[in-house]
Amino acid sequence: MRFITRALPALLALALVGGPVTAGNLTQPSHSISGAIEISKAGGLGRIELHGDVAAVLQRDEGIVALVDVSNSSKPRVLGRYDDGATQSLDGDLAFSTDGRWLFYARQTVQFSRDGLHVIDVSDPKQPALHLYEPAGGALRVEHYDDGADEWVVVMDAIAGMIVYRFEPLTGALVPVHVSPLPALKVGGPASAGIVIQKDPITKTPLLYASTGETGVEIFDFSDPTSPVLLGSWSEVGLAEIEVLVKGKRRFVYAATEYWFDKTNKPYVYELDATNLENITRRRILSAGCKTDDSHRIQGMAIAGNDLYVANSTAGLPVFFGKNLLTFAPVQRGKQNPEAGYPGDFYVFDVEVADGHVFATDAANGYLTILQRGTRAPWDYNSDESPWHGPAHSRSLDC
């Protein structure tokens, strides 16, 4: 296994100096902060979900969801907040319905009566209101899927495992249709689960990708959500946040190492070749930091085109480009909020990319940063290599 090493200061410089950085026939995007907003003055932020010009942002330490107008990236503004008075919130996840009227909020708290799935009516984002509450034992991840005929909601729960609901968008009702106990008790803290559901271009069927902390990643045929069929799995390392990229006839899964069950796991992203679902193999490891304490943890990821954005706490916002190139996008720095669960002047928690902008939340200072995504010269995908054109070796920062 071969490591390519660069010093961290040099990488930080790539993000902070003006103008693109060129290597070979590629041009790295130069990112700049378009706007920022302090959503919480008490705690830190968690997951973010986008629907049109509205961003749902979780105030993770407070158990509050903020609805933010991001139509003007330079001047985002809070429209309203969902606050049901929950205390000692730990974590959670967000997903919108297809029409954007409903927001699904899966929450973990110390108050077990406040755990579970909340269906929030956000038709008026200035006055979000609870419509339905489904109790659950530490609901951690939630994903929404629309198959064209019905809408479905999947929750990863620490007690029950994977729960599938049919969602009725006209009434806001949830109908449980499937429970899989396989991931039960394997979904723990803020980084031990992930869900992706998408129509697969290769098989022409919907696939559900679930990471389950100790068990790695499992891939299901989701053609019949009432009875998902396990097609393949990979379990060499416990995995959490996942993203999927399909190019041509090749399928890649990008999964961050979890750290709730195994504190020795380094903040790596495993690139898995899942082209053959019955024989998923590790292709390489992308290292976005080397420390194994809570100052360097991967909480969120996003793929935009062929670029992989990694929310890696105090390491910042690494971005992997073609040919193993790596740079850091800047984030808003601020004074740590008093109730924030993480120390420091920034702790990047989640990242989403939409309409040429990058949205990053901060678990230390309560800021949402909006970046203008840089541009670069187009390049051709090589089907014989991974999307970053690199050989099957590891990529490291400064190990």
Image (cartoon, rainbow, N blue to C red):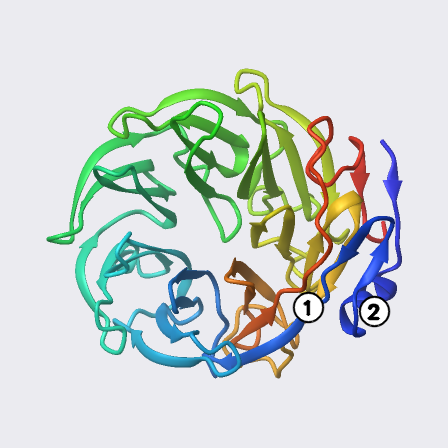
The Cα–Cα distance between marks 2 and 1, rounded to whole angstroms, is 12 Å
Q: Nearer the viewer, residue 72 or 267?
A: 72
Q: What is the x, y in percent for residue 285?
A: 73, 38
| Residue 397 falls left or right of residue 100 | right
Q: What is the x, y in percent for residue 91?
A: 43, 59
Vertical comparison of 330 with 207: above or below: below
Q: Secondary structure at mark 1?
A: loop
User: Residue pushed farthest left?
Assistant: 171
Q: Which residue is pictured at 51% across the width and 44% down the height?
A: 192
Vertical comparison of 91 with 69: above or below: above
* Crowdedness near tag 1: few (<14), some (14–19) or many (≥20) residues, C-alpha within 10 Å: many
Q: Which residue is pictured at 39% across the width and 72% down the height?
A: 62
| Residue 230 falls left or right of residue 341 | left
Q: Based on the displayed image, in which of its 4 quarters is residue 249 positioned? A: top right
Please tell me the numbered disc located at residue 183: none
> From the image, which quarter does the N terminus lie in?
top right
The residue that label 2 is drawn on is 13
